[in-house]
Image (cartoon, rainbow, N blue to C red):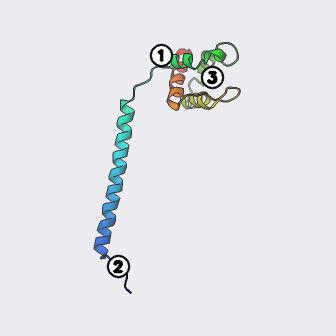
Amino acid sequence: MKGPPMKKTAEAKTEKSRDKVLKQSMTTRLLLVAIVEALAAPIATPDDGAVLVQNHKCGMCNSHGVGPTVQAISAKYAGKADATATVAAVIKNGAQGMPPTAVSGAEARTITSYIRAHGR
């Protein structure tokens, strides 16, 4: 009993090469779609952060002595390269007495922009 005939080496290499090109093409297309979606997304402003702060009732703690004020947060992270990522992570995930919040990563970064712009 014989198995299926083996492809010639040149044909196998051509097929492998074609598969590789198709995978690279698909990866490139997915990357382009992600870039276009990111560029099409509205750009958040610090004023959008003010709306989020109000909607998520951040001031219930951060304006009444339970948590740090916007000014205190801004001063603590002033000049630090990772300030936006750090503050956004605390807003989203909680830390040191602050509970996690129901905000997306993008919303946490928008709130952080508000804090940094209005905390001076």
Looking at the figure, which quarter contains the C terminus?
top right
Q: CA distance from mark 3 to mark 2?
A: 71 Å
Q: CA distance from mark 2 to mark 1?
A: 68 Å
Picture coordinates of residue 57, whole percent (x, y): 60, 17
Q: Give the residue displayed 36% in from the left and 30% down from the top.
A: 40
Q: Secondary structure at mark 2?
A: loop
Identify which amino acid the numbered label 3 is placed on.
Answer: Lys
Q: CA distance from mark 3 to mark 1?
A: 21 Å
Badge 2 or badge 1: first in the primary sequence: 2
- The mark lying in front, picked from 3 and 2, is 2
Q: Which residue is mark 1?
A: 47
Picture coordinates of residue 110, whole percent (x, y): 50, 24
Q: Which residue is mark 3?
A: 76
Q: Give the residue displayed 36% in from the left and 32% down from the top.
A: 39
Is disc 1 surrounded by few (<14), some (14 to 19) or many (20+) residues within 10 Å?
some
Badge 3 or badge 2: first in the primary sequence: 2
